[in-house]
Image (spheres, rainbow, N blue to C red):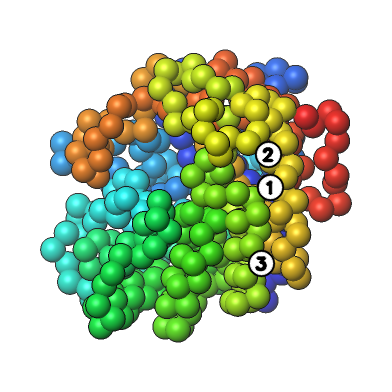
Amino acid sequence: MMTTPPQIRGADVSMTAEVEALGGWFSDAAGARDLFRILADHGVNLARLRVWVDPTDAEGRPYQGGTNDLATTVRLAERARDAGLGLMIDLHYSDFWADPKKQSLPRSWQGLDLDGLCEAVAAHTTEVISAVSANAGSPEWVQVGNETTNGMLWPLGRTPRYDLVNRAFEAVPTDEAREQYDRLARLLHAGSSAVRAADDRSRIVLHLDAGGAADLYRRWFDEITARAVDFDAIGLSYYPLWHGSLADLSGNLHQLVQRYEKDVIVVETAYAYRPDNPAGTSMFDASSPAAVYPASVEGQSRYLHDLARVVRDVPGGRGRGVVYWEPAWLPVPGTSWASTAGMAYGNDVAEPGNGWANQTLFDEGGCALASLSALGATADPLRPMREEDT
């Protein structure tokens, strides 16, 4: 029988191996130390780690973005456990980034029909969870898919596209939409069943983006629950520059726990600690009307404090916590969200490099910011925000 897990104060640090291989290192007031130990000592209690099937091209060239194959993930999971952290394993079911814009078939799965894809999903899930459990213990949480807003494993697992700008689904004939959700449900069921069989101590998360879009979540989870897909928690990406206000997020979280009686977790979030990016390009727009907090360490801390309050206020203790996305992705020379080979695989060509380096919880030299302690306080309802945390 599963026990109630602790409140999540998490960090997705999947980029760590790449950063360290390129010369990055981390420190806090105690000096230079292992990243996972620093995270734990500042209150973080969970590491989220993504897994790609085979993040290299046919010639073996890495896709970067952490090149998070199973071996890399297991090594990071071992380090997280050594520091006393819990684990959330994020299965993308792709060779590279899977998100609402792209859900590319792994190269080795191309040509499979729906039955074949279900078998591949089950086999990959079993392999990953078994390897992590054997080397680092049972992961507390497992994501079956990453930001599956528009489905997964395209084209067979694709569903009606949600337009975030206009807050509406594309028009698809009813019968066609029903068939699309039927196929997606079979793929999700294959993953969930494999998690249960591989390690029944792990809890299953289904994850969408646009955490403030209540209409998206209501339709998607109505469709999925109607098809009896097995899961324990709803994961949300919530980035305030793109996903609405905290009030929007709060309203969505409240409706989700009332409608589906599941736990909810903000599994991705971030905010800038400076308006400019030491790596050059930036994904953060300080001039956006949605940038309601200063792009400063204090503003970052205030954001995390307010986000934590929204999650803690979810009825029935169903708000399980917060995971910060890539707080340790330092701007070391050579790191990139994608190599040329990775961009080609995902058919997603953009400027290489690190557009995230001003949204970390470490400065460009790897020194922990005060906002890291703010993250460590975010999901603990018994520990109020302190002045020194900001």
Residue 11 in view:
yes
Position of the C terminus, as image quadrant, is: top right
In front here: 18 or 342?
342
Q: Amino acid at mark 3?
A: His
Q: Residue at x 49, y 16 (%)?
A: 278
Relative vertical location of residue 161 with respect to residue 98 in this rendering, above or below: below
Disc 2 from disc 1: Cα separation: 6 Å
Answer few, some or many: residues within 10 Å of disc 3's Cα (few below 14, many 20 plus, some between 14 and 19). some
Residue 25 in view:
no
Q: Amino acid at mark 1?
A: Leu
In front here: 96 or 61?
96
Q: Quadrant of residue 303?
A: top right
Q: Is residue 229 shown left or right of residue 169?
A: right
Circle nearer the N terminus (3, 2): 3
Disc 3 from disc 2: Cα separation: 20 Å
Relative vertical location of residue 304 with respect to residue 294 in this rendering, above or below: below
Q: Secondary structure at mark 2?
A: helix
In front here: 187 or 314?
314
Disc 3 from disc 1: Cα separation: 14 Å
Marker disc for residue 254: 3
Marker disc for residue 307: 1
Q: Is residue 169 shown left or right of residue 386?
A: left
Marker disc for residue 303: 2
Answer few, some or many: residues within 10 Å of disc 1's Cα (few below 14, many 20 plus, some between 14 and 19). many
